[in-house]
Image (cartoon, helix red, strand yellow):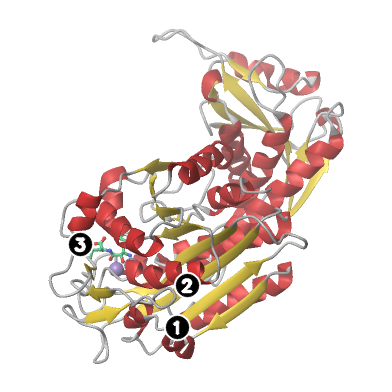
Amino acid sequence: MQTALSFSLLAQIETELLAVTAIDTQTAKGPDVKPEPVLLTSDAAVRAAAAAVLSTGEFKAAANETLLLHAPAGLKAKRLVIVGLGKKAKATVHAVRNAAGTAVRCAKPRAIRELVFALPENGSEGPLHAMTCARAAAEGAIVGDFDPDTYRSERKDVSVHSFTLAAPTTSDQPAIQAAFNQGVIVGESQNFARSLVNEPGNKLTPTVFGQRAAKMASEVGLKSEVYSTDKLHELKMGAFWSVSQGSEEPPALIVLRYEPEGVTEGPVLGLVGKGITFDTGGISIKPADNMEKMKYDMAGGAAMVGAMRAIALLKPRVRVIGIVCSAENMPDGKAQKPGDIQTAMSLGDKPGKTIEIINTDAEGRLVLADGLTYARSLGATHLIDAATLTGACVVALGMINAGAFSNDDATIEKFQAGLATSGEKFWRLPLSDEYYDMIRSDIGDIKNTGGRWGGAITAAEFLHAFAEDTPWIHLDIAGLAWIEDKKPFIAKGPSGVAVRSILEWVRSYEG
Ligand code: BES
Ligand code: MN
Ligand code: ZN
């Protein structure tokens, strides 16, 4: 999708589809109360073109509600679509992001390949800041343009070719342009992550994952290294290796480095992603129902790769290392078994922790354990990991919030502050020694599962044992990495969740 900015008068813009936003200002309730939608544009011609239909009360301007008008009088646009932002109080920048996606997804099935989205005009109607909205609109439009049907012989939803954001002539044009450009980078990076997550297990093996990450890295100027079995043995990554040992596909340890010139001091951020390209469960095999979904068990790794892409292009002044531990979890004659003991990578001369495998389906924490230790060995001072780690997290938070855990309040507060920009929902869950007690092993140091209760937390405590005292955040995105029902602004399928929030966290360390 091509993107552009325009500072022309809306009425003068020749386009297939002009999209404008509206809010619902009605405060009264009741059966006979009419909605009071208000367009967020000062363009008199657009207001006039929409006046009659808005006065009917048929359109409420509910969030992502659309109203399409053909041949709108007085406008050069062929069609006008009004997209609702919802009630005035809820019409935030996040509603604008979604509205831009909704506009694009309104165009796609109608074979409209080109549209112009009018930046909501603040006026006295609300707190919509032009720059943040310009960025969000670009993100939303690009995210909205993605569809997962890449293997259909004839794709149903062909891309929109051109998206233009129209901002008022009076705007601070360079500032709007800069914000819009950022949004394009962020949206494209999120879609890059989604395109990886969308790939089935036979197409995106750990090796291919490594190749795709390395190709992206060379395109955006990141250093990359992709290792396999030999390196895992050399580093004594017994936990990571144990997951891959049951598969014909060799593992991939993907390392991406962002080293801004002249930055030799300050934090080194370590981003560690779970990259299980298919999770059968291993010998503790999963039931057949929904097992096909387990191709998205590399969504945490994809989020890190997507975030690294955005970081490389946005160039924050802080060093970042991205690590993906990629493997396929398969049952096989060589696969690990419940009861096996594995020795994890260690830091320095310390002996590696011994792990008693209770359930081979709790494999994500095994690959991440060595990934976290490896990040620390490379000098990471702060860690963040992302993983589709537990069904228990989905039980706890549903598909609305992802889980977030941390051993350090200041570190997670920075992450939480960034959610106001990213618009993603993460909810902090607790850690404590009592939960760690649930994963002590009788035969070794630690067990890879802690029983039925508090499963998201015992999984996080397992990772905590490897992050130790290094400030660390763990994101459990099992419930949000895959969208089960389509929404007006985003397709069913891979969501690209966490890319934007990880990026904001990284930017919060810019010194
Ligand atoms: N990849 C799964 C978790 C998952 C579940 C992701 C649902 C997305 C949707 C993970 O490897 C897993 O199998 N976890 C087990 C852990 C259990 C064996 C302790 C789970 O959640 O059941
Ligand atoms: Mn599993
Ligand atoms: Zn898994």
Image quadrant in which you'd find residue 470: bottom left
Label 1 beta carbon within 8 A of ligand 3: no
**Spatial CA span between label 1 and label 2:** 8 Å
Q: Amino acid at mark 3?
A: Ile
Task: Indicate the secondary structure of the residue bearing disc 3.
Answer: loop
Label 2 beta carbon within 8 A of ligand 3: no
Mark 3 is surrounded, within 10 Å at the Cα level, by few (under 14), some (14 to 19) or many (20 or more) other residues, namely: many
Q: Amino acid at mark 2?
A: Tyr
- Left or right, 361 with respect to 427, comes to left
Residue 145: give x, y in percent of width and height.
61, 53
Contact, mark 1 vs mark 2 (Cβ under 8 Å): yes
Task: Indicate the secondary structure of the residue bearing disc 2.
Answer: helix
Check disc 1 and report the residue beneath it. 235
Instruction: Please report the residue visible at 58 percent of the width from the left and 61 percent of the height from the top.
Output: 306
Query: Earlier along the polypeptide chain: callout 3 or callout 1?
Result: 1
User: Is residue 444 visible to us here?
Assistant: yes
Query: Earlier along the polypeptide chain: callout 2 or callout 3?
Result: 2
**Spatial CA span between label 3 and label 1:** 25 Å
* Extreme residue in the front direction: 349
Residue 510: give x, y in percent of width and height.
67, 48
Task: Indicate the secondary structure of the residue bearing disc 1.
Answer: loop
Check disc 2 and report the residue beneath it. 374
**Spatial CA span between label 2 and label 3:** 22 Å
Front position in the image: 84 or 188: 188
Q: How many marks?
A: 3
Where does the N terminus fall, quadrant-wise?
A: bottom right
Query: Earlier along the polypeptide chain: callout 1 or callout 2?
Result: 1
Residue 171: give x, y in percent of width and height.
83, 29
